[in-house]
């Protein structure tokens, strides 16, 4: 089949089916997947004839050219997500809203993992599938909310927060799993995670400035700007691939770097037509992988996967939205809106298939699941009252009462956190976000930091002790899930403890530095702080020997990074002292 004919058939099929789905007020992604199904090698139209013309003549059996366009499309999809992402936007969402989004992601993953494990998948494959099934699609959900005129509902900020966090989790996952065999080596997994974190920090602090410098010396014409943007995105993507983190992660980082430039909005508008074209080929190529006959031959498995994708995300989203302060009806609306499966799941699934962890038909199953979950969301988006009424009639009364009590407690904690906790100073120190300093008086701010440090230190010890206790119990799926949640709590609380302790030491040094003019005293303070972090690092490394999971080393790596920062500050003080 001639290349020009393949492109002509692809573009024509994409156009016709997309027009049909638009007339039906359905997301265009469904049309793109359906177009791929109809002209793919397993097309149900194969053998049909319209007069003397056989539809088999338009069936595409050669993937090479389509895959080239699809690869560029996946790059632009991740680039567009990176272009929309910024730490400022994340910080403006509020700590409590971010925690609600994190609860949704963690709960959806846990539910999916438990159910998928019972379907006979190996643990590593179950981890992949659980992550894939717990993600929601940003473009599909945005299109549904826009078409159903729901974009101004009060639940939308919560939905956006969840989607931003999930996109970030998906990109992190793509970066971590890009190295073959990484999941079989716990130490390599931890190193890979730390490498991705460092790369993100480098991209945010240094790469963004390099990109801004390059863009400032480029012609203002849109044509030149588009060429420069695509060139930068592909270059960073290939560098990311060379570092072992995957092409997609590089595309996201390129978008994040450009997002901080003054021309970000202009670039987004300029590349939108190209993004639409090549992203269409990505979804079209995924549709070509769907084998309708194979789908019906595995109808039980596919039905179970669809049920997990819809039911797991619905329950997790409804619970997290309810705890975030929304009413039961509003929580049901947010949960229905978050049902569509993410297009990033296809990228993660493709990586799992290429590594031999997932079976070859995974992408076809995921494409079918995207179609089914999107149709379910469209059908149920206006029926939150009926869904809420059905849930109230089904769920036992004692569970409803406990849920209401938990929601009331959560709202009180939210109000207390708003009054007593200020993390603006942490965000303010991240470039290029302004130079806003802590709004509290110095003594109150220091007291708050020390109190938070003690609280998170105790929480870390409790999480660690609970994990150590569970090791001596008989293994089961429930213990595995609980251990994973405790491990996540230990990692997060230890990291937050490190951040608070570092901020407290900085505040103490600043306060004492103003009261004492002796340079030797200030230098000694810096070295004392470095020594404290060194001792804590040694303790964490010793504790890591008692835990089987590689993620337990992450707090130690955080303390190592802060120790390095403290040593640099101490060295700077020593150099000033000697000069």
Image: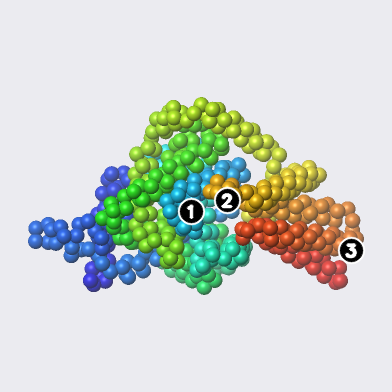
Quarter of the figure with the N terminus: bottom left
Spatial distance from mark 2 to mark 1, Cα to Cα?
A: 22 Å
Q: Distance between the residues labelled 2 and 3?
A: 55 Å
- Rendered-image quadrant of the C terminus: bottom right
Q: Mark 2 points at which residue?
A: 475
Q: Where is residue 363 in the image (x, y as percent from the top left)?
A: 37, 58
> Can you identify the residue that label 1 sits on?
131
Q: Residue at x 35, y 50 (%)?
A: 302
Q: Residue at x 44, y 36 (%)?
A: 333
Q: For residue 55, what is the image quadrant?
A: bottom left
Name the front one of labels 2 and 3: 2
Q: Nearer the viewer, mark 2 or mark 1?
A: 2
Q: How crowded is mark 1: few (under 14 residues within 10 Å), some or many (20 or more)?
A: many
Looking at marks 2 and 3 on the same chain, the residue that comes earlier in the sequence is marked by 2
Camera-side residue of 137 and 552: 552
Label 1's element? helix
Label 2 sits on a secondary structure element that is loop
Residue 520: mark: 3
Where's residue 52, x and y in %?
Answer: 9, 61
Measured Cα–Cα span from mark 3 to mark 1: 52 Å
**Residue 66 seen in the current view:** yes
Residue 502 is tagged as none
Q: Residues within 10 Å of mark 2 (few under 14, many from 20)?
A: few
- Give the residue drawn at x 26%, y 49%: 20
């Amino acid at each position: 089949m001639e290349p020009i004919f393949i492109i002509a058939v692809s573009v024509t099929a994409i156009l016709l089916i997309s027009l049909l789905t638009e007339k039906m007020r359905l997301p265009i992604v469904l049309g793109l997947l359906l177009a791929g199904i109809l002209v793919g090698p397993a097309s149900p139209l194969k053998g049909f004839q319209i007069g003397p013309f056989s539809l088999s003549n338009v069936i595409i059996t050669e993937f090479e050219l389509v895959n080239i366009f699809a690869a560029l499309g996946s790059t632009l999809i991740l680039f567009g997500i990176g272009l929309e992402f910024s730490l400022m936007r994340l910080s403006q969402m509020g700590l409590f809203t971010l925690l609600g989004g994190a609860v949704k992601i963690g709960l959806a993953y846990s539910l999916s993992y438990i159910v998928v494990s019972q379907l006979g998948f190996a643990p590593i494959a179950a981890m992949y599938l659980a992550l894939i099934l717990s993600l929601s699609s940003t473009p599909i959900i945005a299109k549904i909310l826009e078409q159903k005129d729901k974009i101004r509902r009060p639940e939308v900020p919560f939905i956006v927060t969840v989607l931003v966090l999930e996109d970030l989790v998906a990109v992190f996952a793509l970066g971590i799993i890009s190295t073959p065999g990484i999941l079989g080596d716990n130490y390599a997994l931890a190193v890979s995670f730390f490498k991705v974190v460092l790369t993100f920090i480098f991209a945010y602090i240094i790469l963004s400035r390099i990109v801004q410098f390059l863009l400032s010396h480029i012609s203002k014409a849109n044509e030149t700007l588009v060429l420069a943007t695509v060139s930068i995105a592909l270059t960073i993507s290939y560098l990311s691939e060379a570092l072992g983190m995957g092409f997609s992660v590089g595309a996201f980082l390129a978008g994040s770097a450009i997002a901080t430039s003054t021309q970000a909005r202009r670039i987004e508008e300029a590349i939108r037509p190209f993004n639409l074209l090549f992203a269409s080929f990505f979804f079209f190529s995924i549709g070509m992988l769907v084998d309708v006959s194979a789908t019906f031959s595995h109808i039980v498995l596919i039905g179970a996967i669809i049920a997990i994708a819809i039911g797991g995300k619905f329950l997790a989203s409804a619970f997290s939205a309810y705890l975030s302060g929304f009413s039961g009806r509003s929580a049901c609306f947010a949960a229905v809106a978050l049902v569509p499966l993410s297009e990033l799941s296809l990228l993660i699934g493709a990586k799992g298939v290429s590594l031999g962890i997932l079976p070859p038909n995974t992408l076809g199953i995921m494409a079918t699941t995207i179609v089914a979950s999107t149709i379910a969301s469209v059908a149920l988006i206006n029926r939150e009252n009926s869904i809420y009424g059905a849930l109230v009639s089904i769920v036992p009364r004692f569970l409803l009462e406990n849920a209401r009590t938990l929601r009331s407690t959560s709202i009180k904690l939210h109000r207390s956190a708003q009054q007593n906790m200020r993390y603006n100073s942490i965000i303010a120190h991240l470039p290029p976000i302004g130079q806003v300093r802590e709004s509290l008086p110095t003594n109150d701010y220091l007291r708050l930091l020390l109190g938070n440090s003690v609280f998170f230190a105790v929480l870390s010890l409790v999480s660690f002790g609970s994990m150590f206790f569970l090791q001596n119990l008989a293994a089961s799926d429930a213990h595995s899930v609980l251990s994973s949640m405790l491990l996540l709590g230990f990692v997060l609380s230890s990291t937050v403890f490190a951040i608070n302790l570092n901020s407290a030491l900085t505040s103490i040094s600043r306060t004492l530095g103003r009261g004492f003019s002796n340079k030797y005293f200030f230098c000694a303070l810096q070295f004392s702080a470095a020594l404290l972090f060194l001792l804590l690092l040694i303790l964490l490394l010793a504790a890591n020997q008692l835990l089987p999971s590689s993620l337990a080393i992450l707090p130690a790596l955080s303390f190592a990074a802060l120790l390095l920062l403290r040593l640099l500050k101490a060295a700077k003080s020593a150099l000033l002292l000697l000069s």
